[in-house]
Image (spheres, rainbow, N blue to C red):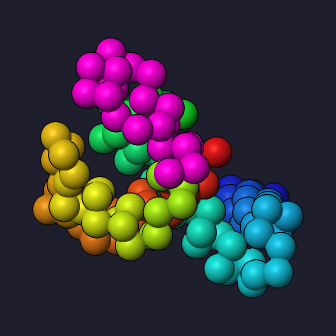
Amino acid sequence: MTRTTDTLKAVCVAFAIVALASVLFFPGRSSAAGVGKAVAAVDAGGDFKAKCAMCHGPDGAGNTPTGKNMKIKDLRSGEVQGMSDGDIYNAIANGKGKMQGYLKSLGADKCKQLAAYVKQLK
């Protein structure tokens, strides 16, 4: 076999794994939509770790020195989880209380992805 054939096979196998994972983890959706949502969740998780976890903690509980000092809410709480997607987006994009807004640095799409990420913290 040639190197090109081996590379093509590896790409096809990787695509098949991603497609299968999207069907398993996102049933009822097309595999393309599932892959897109899975990628967005991974991106949002990285953004959460980079921008939010210092205060909110990796699990969103707020059990960090900064979180405790600022008395921030547990993002997994019923109060936060009961907020609309738009309200969570606005808090992330525009800031709330002492928290800075991230619309300028992350953009609207990443702020929306972070809002969706917060809603899945439980």
Q: Does the image show residue 106?
A: no
Relative vertical location of residue 99 with respect to residue 34 in this rendering, above or below: above
Instruction: Find residue 5 and report its horizontal and vertical position in percent.
Output: 74, 65
Q: Is residue 27 left or right of residue 11?
A: right
- Toward which corner of the image does residue 109 lie, by quadrant? bottom left
- Secondary structure predominantly adopted by residues drawn in magenta: loop
At 65% from the left and 70% from the top, the residue drawn is: 35
Residue drawn 62% across the image and 62% down it: 38
Q: Is residue 117 left or right of residue 97?
A: right
4 to 75, vertically: above or below: below
Please count the marks in the image. Answer: 0
What residue is drawn where x is 30% and y is 41%? 51
- What x and y, as percent, mark residue 55? 33, 30
Q: Quadrant of the N terminus?
A: bottom right
Name the residue nearer the viewer: 26 or 7. 26
- Residue ranking furthest to the front: 79
Which span is picked out in magenta?
A: 60-79
Q: Does 55 sit above or below residue 65? A: below
In the rendered view of the protein, which quadrant contains the C terminus? Answer: top right
Asked if residue 47 can be seen in this view, the reply is yes
Residue 56, image quadrant: top left
Q: Position of residue 59 (x, y in %)?
A: 54, 34
Residue 48: say if magenta. Answer: no
Q: Residue at horizontal 75%, vertical 84%? A: 30
In this picture, residue 58 sits left or right of residue 27: left
73 is within the stretch colored magenta: yes
* Coordinates of residue 31 in the picture (x, y in percent): 74, 78
